[in-house]
Amino acid sequence: MTARILVVEDNPANMKLVSMVLAKGGHHVLQADDAESGVVLAADEQPDLILMDILLPGMDGLEATRRLKTDPLTARIRVVALTAFAMKEDELRIQSAGFDGYIAKPIQYKSFLQEVERWLSESAGPRGPAI
């Protein structure tokens, strides 16, 4: 399934890796290196999925996701945290901000693409499972 995926990531090496893996998986990648740009791009481009880092300059990924989920233009778009934070308390913060789920960094090529495909397939239907 080819999809338009917005990646919001401020680390150039992570952005390059994630974008390359997604492109090799047949997806069209949109990029934003900060949360404010990501929120604007999401509203303008209406991607199929957003992969959002948590620690971003200026507004963090938690606040950006809260804004996306309360805006009628972007509320339906699945937002998945792409983060190194994977502790139980981090999961609760991610969930309470409105993320649909998370993928832990560092990413593993095959499992990353499988997770992305799972989120894309769930995007077509009702809200997916809780974290």
Image: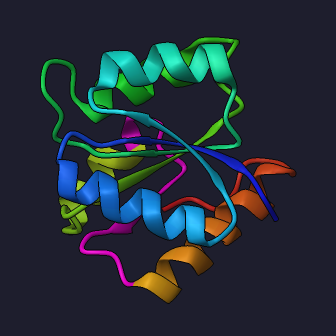
x 48%, y 76%: residue: 112
Figure quadrant of residue 7: top left
Question: Looking at the image, how many numbered discs can be counted on the residues?
Answer: 0
Residue located at (27% from left, 27% from top): 34
| Residue 55 screen position, x and y as percent | 16, 41
Question: Which residue corresponds to the image point at 44% horizontal and 57% vertical from the top-left?
Answer: 19
Tell me which colouring the rendered structure shows.
rainbow
Is residue 79 inside the magenta stretch?
no
Asked if residue 94 lies left or right of residue 118, the reply is left
- Residue 60 position, x and y percent, is 22, 29
Q: Which stretch did the figure color magenta?
A: 96-108
For image coordinates 34% across by 47% down, the residue present is: 94
In front of the other: 118 or 101:
118
Q: Main secondary structure of the magenta part?
A: loop
From the top left corner, tell me how far across and down residue 115 is, in percent.
Answer: 57, 73
Establish if 21 lies above or below 45: below
Camera-side residue of 50 and 18: 18
Q: Quadrant of the N terminus?
A: bottom right
Is residue 104 in the magenta section? yes
Considering only vertical position in the picture, is 106 above or below 19?
A: below
**Quadrant of residue 116 within the rendered picture:** bottom right
The answer to whether residue 8 is left or right of residue 23 is left
Residue that sits furthest to the right in the current view = 125
Query: Relative to the observer, which residue lies in front, 17 or 95?
Result: 17
Is 20 left, or right, of 84 in this rendering?
right
Left of 124 or right of it: where is 97? left
- Asked if residue 55 is positioned above or below residue 105 in the image, the reply reads above
Q: Is residue 14 above or below residue 75?
A: below
Front residue (pair 122, 97): 122
